[in-house]
Image: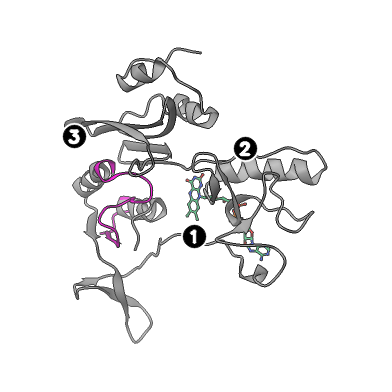
Amino acid sequence: MGGGLVSLKTAYGLLERGLQVTVVVSSSSILSQVMDGVAAGLLQRHLEEHGMRFYLGHDVAEVEVSATGEVTGVVLTGGTRLPAHLVVVGKGVMPNIDFLRGTPVAVNRGILVNQYLESSVPGVYAAGDVAESYDLLRREPAINAIWPNAAAQGESAGYNMAGERRPYRGSIAMNSASFYGLSAITAGLNRVDGHGYEGYAWKDAARNNYRKLVFAGDRLVGFTMVGDTRRAGTLTSLILGQVPLGDRKKRLIEGDNILPA
Ligand SMILES: Cc1cc2nc3c(=O)[nH]c(=O)nc-3n(C[C@H](O)[C@H](O)[C@H](O)COP(=O)(O)OP(=O)(O)OC[C@H]3O[C@@H](n4cnc5c(N)ncnc54)[C@H](O)[C@@H]3O)c2cc1C
């Protein structure tokens, strides 16, 4: 259950071990929080070619269990029944903050922190998946729950707790996955609608290649790469540094090499 990276990586692992795997996804495309429908479509087709099956736009309404407590199947919204021996739920992760509700530590989706990773209670800090810190690109509090962000926030919080004032500059969303040799990497913002962003995309379906760049003015704010993921590191640096690209924006769009500044 679930079309995110955790769910798909689990499904991939099970498929590789020889199981028959069906992925049930509420959204109309897999990885809908991570990439656009074109990129997701390439990955889905590739996984289907290797035997993974998908039910998009469906939820699991019921898990059937035998009298002896074993899973025997699931029933989808709409009534379709799928036999199953194992159900894996990969429907997202929530910070464990219930114990803080009603205390002076301010929480929203996670623990709210300032640029020093300090919570609303002076001297109490939070970092990592539990902290709703600053998103560098969205310019608002967010939880970008990945390991490198957690490590950077932990380092920053540690310095500040030890008395050295070090602002945390903010996180961005980043994701990567590889299924049967087809890699995909995304970073930053990948939805262009309604935010004044400009997006450029190339697709070579025959070679399973897709690249999309998203700009705010002459700054790169996001990219998606499926297939050829070369230069992902360089592009991520441009996003993190919010480097003004000037003329190099055009060269980036046209696929030329980026020259050092
Ligand atoms: C299945 C899965 C796959 C992932 N894959 C990737 C990946 O490929 N790349 C990547 O960058 N990130 C990945 N992540 C995310 C990554 O694991 C997290 O971003 C990272 O572990 C966050 O570190 P953390 O220290 O903030 O939180 P955690 O690693 O979750 O550590 C929090 C700890 O606090 C403990 N805890 C919780 N509540 C309390 C409490 N009340 N009192 C005391 N202790 C408590 C928990 O038991 C846990 O040990 C994945 C996550 C999952 C779940």
Residue 160 forms part of the magenta stretch: no
Badge 3 density bin: few <14, some 14–19, many ≥20, Cα 10 Å: few
Judged from this view, the residue extending furthest toward the right is 163
The one nearer the camera, 73 or 147, is 147
Q: Which of 193 and 45 is in front in this view?
A: 193
Q: Name the residue under label 1.
A: 93
Q: In the rendered image, which residue does mark 2 sit on?
A: 169
Badge 3 or badge 2: first in the primary sequence: 2
Q: Is residue 18 magenta?
A: yes
Main secondary-structure element of the magenta-colored stretch:
loop
Crowd tier of the residue under label 2, counting other residues whose Cα lies within 10 Å: few below 14, some 14–19, many 20 or above: some
Kindly identify the residue that appears in the image at 29 percent across and 19 percent down: 254
The quarter of the displayed image where residue 20 is located: bottom left
Q: What residue type is labelled 2?
A: Arg
Magenta residues (range): 16-39
Question: Type of residue at label 1?
Answer: Val
Please report the residue visible at 33 percent of the width from the left and 56 percent of the height from the top: 3
Left or right: where 188 falls relative to 66:
right
| Frontmost residue, 142 versus 178 | 142
